[in-house]
Amino acid sequence: MTVISRKRLREFGMKYPDARKPLDVWRKLMEDRDYEHLPDLRSVFPTADQIEKMGNLFCFNIKGNTYRLIVGISFPKTVFVKELLTQDEYNKRYLVL
């Protein structure tokens, strides 16, 4: 798959240096193959979740639950980086308590 935009991943890694290596590993795993659907993603990323049930927005845990990577996926070829968030930012934005 093609990951767009690597720049956002690098910028987040500059802000949170402990996220650099996990983001690089995630990117390489995404670019190494074309995924067809969520179960295919979960074979490599067991904690991947679909945020929009009928949409293309997905969440990946980065560095355990320290960071969350939100992407849009156009199966089977393209991944669009939407947001990189700390766990607290993710909870405030996506979890309804």
Image (tube, rainbow, N blue to C red):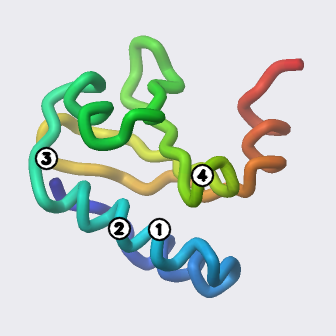
Position of 72 with respect to 34 (left or right) is: right
**Sequence-first tag of 1 and 3:** 1
**Sequence-first tag of 4 and 1:** 1
Q: What numbered label is drawn on residue 97? A: none
**Sequence-first tag of 3 and 4:** 4
User: In terms of secondary structure, where does tag 3 sit?
Assistant: loop
Q: Residue at x 46, y 13 (%)?
A: 53
Circle 4 packing at 10 Å, graded few (<14), some (14-19), many (20+), is few
Q: Residue at x 35, y 67 (%)?
A: 25
Residue type at the position of mark 1:
Pro
Q: CA distance from mark 3 to mark 4?
A: 26 Å
Mark 1 vs mark 3, foreground winner is 1
Residue 16 sits in quarter:
bottom right
Residue 44 spot, x, y in % from top left: 27, 42
Q: Which residue is mark 1?
A: 22
Q: Are marks 1 and 2 in contact (CB under 8 Å)?
A: yes
Q: Which residue is mark 3?
A: 77
Residue type at the position of mark 4:
Gly
Q: CA distance from mark 4 to mark 2?
A: 13 Å
Position of 80 with respect to 87 (left or right) is: left
Q: Which residue is mark 2?
A: 25
**Sequence-first tag of 4 and 2:** 2
**Sequence-first tag of 2 and 3:** 2
Q: Which residue is mark 4?
A: 64
In the image, 43 versus 50, the foreground residue is 43
Q: Residue at x 54, y 47 (%)?
A: 61
